Amino acid sequence: MVELCQDKSGINQFMVTNGYLLTPDLAYELKKNLGLKEYQITLDGPPEVHDKRRIKNDGSGTFERILSNIKGILNHDDLKDIVIIIRVNIDNSNRKDFPALLDIIEKEGIKEKIYVYPGHVKSENTTTTCVVHNCLNKREFAEVESEMFRELLKRGFKSLRIPRPRNTCAAVSPHTMVIGPEGEIYKCWMSVGKKEDLIGHLEDNGQCKVENIALYLKWVNFDVLAREKCRNCKILPLCMGGCIYPEIKGEKSRECDSLKFNLEEMIKLVPLFKSVDKKFG
Ligand code: SF4
């Protein structure tokens, strides 16, 4: 696929990973052989928090190894162009621990080499009551989020969330496909492994064969302006309707973007975003 895309307009690759197996040697191999240069790695807080939630089979924690991998990549002479984005999973139980994680990142001397942002932990499965219990609703998260961005920017971290117009979710594009491990085709990465969400299959010659045309059309015909609440929403160009997966499944539409609740606070942070951006060119 890499060779095919390089003949055309090139390929951009991005990996979302827990970072545990992402050693500098592996990152080097992935860059050399596949051109992979951007990673999002999730942390759940400082070690005393992260290691209670992100554990191995034997119950031991993963924080030290993930941090060591990140530092190893950032300090590797041949990996200077690698971009690492740390997503800090935030819920009610760890929201207070965010500054302690930033202290560690600063102490390790990697603050200026990475991006950090708070990520909203949501439950996709309402049967997992302990998760549901700890999740912040969108309004609560919005409040926490703007405080966290203020903290990040005050400390001089590079960050990502400056309010700006977005596109509708890529899944509605006729050309966006998610390819599963068996060559199955879906429109959304939340569908992977769900037979009822299958759109089609990859053929041996690499062509996409769309078999469930009705479902495919449901995705590509999504129109944010057909939703009354979006049509009348003051932040529409900053959101463009958010995640539409539940709607495709015939469920109630997802919660709104946090910017709907913290836009004013986030706009107040724009000069700080800009001054940090300027510092990093
Ligand atoms: S914030 Fe909510 S209402 Fe506004 S555009 Fe996004 S999904 Fe629609």
Image (cartoon, rainbow, N blue to C red):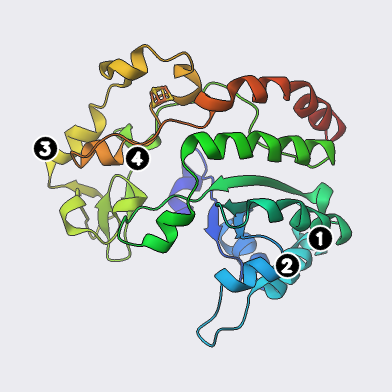
Q: How far apart are marks 3 and 4 (CA)?
A: 16 Å
Q: Provide the residue designation for mark 4.
A: 176
92 horizontally vs 196: left or right: right
Q: Provide the residue designation for mark 1.
A: 104
Q: How far apart are marks 4 and 1 (CA)?
A: 38 Å
Foreground tag (2 vs 4):
2
Q: Which of marks 2 and 4 is nearer the N terminus?
A: 2
Image location (x, y in percent) of residue 215: 16, 40
Front-lying residue, 242 or 262: 262
Q: Can you see residue 47? A: yes
Q: Classify 10 Å Cα crowding around label 2: few (below 14), some (14-19), many (20 and above).
A: some
Q: Which residue is pictured at 61% across the width and 83% down the height?
A: 60
Q: Provide the residue designation for mark 2.
A: 67
Q: How far apart are marks 3 and 2 (CA)?
A: 45 Å
164 horizontally vs 236: left or right: right
Task: Kindly identify the amino acid type of the residue bearing the numbered disc 4.
Answer: Thr
Q: Which residue is pictured at 37% across the width and 11% down the height?
A: 232
The secondary element bearing badge 4 is classed as: loop
Q: Disc 2 vs disc 1: Cβ atoms closer than 8 Å?
A: yes
Q: Classify 10 Å Cα crowding around label 1: few (below 14), some (14-19), many (20 and above).
A: some
Q: Which residue is pictured at 82% across the width and 32% down the height?
A: 276
Q: Is the CB atom of the residue marked by disc 4 within 8 angstroms of ligand 1's nearest atom?
A: no
